[in-house]
Each structure stands twice: as C-alpha cells, then as structure tokens.
Amino acid sequence: MISTSAATRGSVTLKRVSPQLLQSFNGLSTLSPSLSSLVVVQHIQPITCRRNFSFTSTNPKIHEFFPQKETEKVRKTEPAWPHPMYTEEQMRSVEVAHREAKTYSDKVALLAVKLLRWGLDIATGYKHEHAAAKHKGDLAAAKKYAMTEEKYMIRNVFLESVAGVPGMVAGMLRHLHSMRRMKRDNGWIETLLEESFNERMHLLTFLKMSEPGLFMRTMVLGAQGVWFNALFIAYLMSPRTVHRFVGYLEEEAVITYTRQINDIEAGRLPKWEKLEAPQIAIDYWKMPEGNRTMKDLLLYIRADESKHREVNHTLGNLDQKNDPNPYVSEYKLSQAQQPHPTKDLAFPRPVGWERKDII
C-alpha cells in the first residue's frame, strides 16, 4: 500500500524510483487481486499559492464546463421568457450614454454606482486602456495593466453573478406588496423578473466558457449576500432610487462590453476572434448562421444591457405605485403609431422615457 503522504513528497522523490521497480509493482498487481487497485503516480505538479479566479478555454471550439444532463424522457427545456429578436443593425447602433443626475435621489444613485464600480475594478483587476497607455514604454507594466481574455472573463462572470439580483429583489418585493395591498401591480413584476432571468442567462453563457475557481466562488458568495440585503433595504426605502441606480449601473455595463468589442476588432484579444458562442447562447438569442462568434455574443449581451439601462431609467421616472409598466402595455391607436417603449430595440431611448411622453 502506498500512502498519500508518501505520494506528496514531490516529483524529486519519484524520479528516484527505477523502471525495474515500477515493472515489479505492475507485475505484482496482475498476480494478486488485492493489489489490482495499485496506482502509479508518474508526476505530481507542485502546489502553487495563487488565487484561482477562473480557468478559461483557449480553444476556438467551446469546452463546456457544465454540460446539460440528459434525462430519460425530457428532450429540451425552453427558456421561460423567449428573447426578443435583435437585428445586427440595431445591435451595432447601441451607444454609450449617460443620464444627467438631476435630483438628490439621482445623485445618491450615481455616487453609489461610482463606489461600486471602483470596488469591482479592484476585485476583478480591471484596467482601462489609458492605464496601459501610461506605461507604453514599459513592456512589463503595459502587460500588467492591459486587459486580456482571461481578465475580461473574470470581470464578466463576477459582474453577471450580481447583475441578476436587483430585478429579482424588486420583483419579489413588488409581488409581496401587491398581495398585501390586494391590488394589481400593473405589469411591473413580470418585466423585473424577466430582466433578472436575462442577466442569469448571461452568466450561464459565460460559465460555458469559464470555470470559476474557489476564490471567485467565495467572492461571488460574499458579494451576493451583501448585495441582496442592501438592495432589499434600499428598495423598501426608495424604489425610484434603486431603479435609477440600476440604470446607472447598466450604463457602466454598456461601457464595459463596448470596450471588449472594440478590443476584439482592434486585434487585442486574439483568442476571442474566432471563438464560437456556446449552444446555450445560440438557442437563447436565436443567433443566425455566420454570426455566432464571441464578438456576436458580446453584441447581443451589450444590447441587453442597453435595454436594461433604458427600462430602469424609465421606471425610475414613473409613479412607483400607480403607473402601469409601459413595456407590457398596449397603447391607444394615436400613441401606438408613435415611438413608444417596447421589449426589443425598435425605439431605443438610452436615457429612459419621460413620464409625460408615455403615460
């Protein structure tokens, strides 16, 4: 019997074992049934002390870390909320935009987003392109600050793991509030839960390409616990402020994914240039043939984030208790012929719709 303590002495000790000795062990295992489970360790990698954020596949063909389990009778499970169709022109027309903070509530929301962005940048090692430009002459420093496929994937996984929380918290609280008041919610709950579902699909897509390590899982666990409870209390106090906060947060998400798309087009992310989107993304967004690369996937995700930006800025402009949700409402004939809020990108309004224009 070979003890585990002996096996962990390292490859230096194992190199001293002669080929004849190994052959004799293998011979004994064929003679004695009790030794048939003998395992010969050829090499043991030394343990390195580094934080395992994630392991990202570098193969253009996706290696799915969490493959779908086959069952005896179920063939396929469709998404509860089918995704609206986007055209390539609509997705490419998405632009970075910012809504000016006008009220005290807006300013509080914007400040909170800036603080959160600062903390997230530190946690995920995110650096803007100007950080690398400052150290252009220093190759080591430029390499340190430049974003890579692995750094972007770490950020995306962490970002999407908490992005699905606000919609779920808001939808849950409005659901309970509707039952307490014994009144309808006017369609807000469905849109909020659908937004949360959409963010989770972003996360599941990235998880098909990256397996988070223990350190990343611990970070997500801690962040999700703090994030959920903070939003729970904040939404009870001021739903309008939370919607504005999420709108500003989605503005940052659009910036992040725009930079990733630009880096791919500039050739700074060679591993992603021909990387194929996983099947879960193809099915969910109904990605057409010939438009299923990583860049196409990021275009879809950025378009989703731009829609969340618009939706939350719009909801932040409405009467939180009495106004109907304009994204699931049927408009009168006079308004239906005019631009109005929709689930798709037919009439984009990056900074949100004003109440007087839609209610």
Image: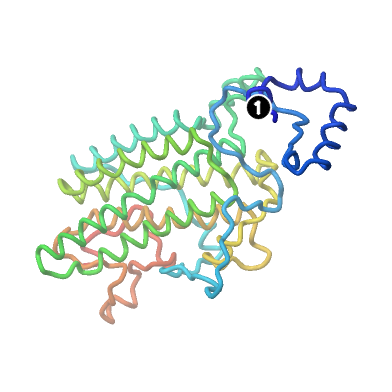
Q: Find residue 10 and report its horizontal and vertical position in percent.
A: 70, 21
Q: Residue at x 60, y 30 (%)?
A: 146
Q: Find residue 329 and report its horizontal and vertical position in percent.
A: 28, 73
Q: What is the crowding at mark 1: few (fewer than 14 residues within 10 Å), some, or many (at least 20)?
A: few
Q: Find residue 135 and report its horizontal and vertical position in percent.
A: 60, 20
Q: Nearer the viewer, residue 60 or 121?
A: 60
Q: Is residue 155 above or below residue 42?
A: below
Q: Nearer the viewer, residue 209 or 354?
A: 209
Label 1 SS:
loop
Q: Nearer the viewer, residue 257 or 351?
A: 257
Q: Residue at x 15, y 64 (%)?
A: 178
Q: Residue at x 37, y 58 (%)?
A: 195
The reply, left or right, for residue 22 in relation to residue 146 is: right
The reply, left or right, for residue 302 in relation to residue 311 is: right
Q: Find residue 318 and report its horizontal and vertical position in percent.
A: 20, 59
The quadrant of the rendering that contains the N terminus is: top right
The number of numbered discs placed on residues in the rendered structure image is 1
Residue holding disc 1: 3
The quadrant of the rendering that contains the C terminus is: bottom left
Q: Nearer the viewer, residue 270 or 212?
A: 212
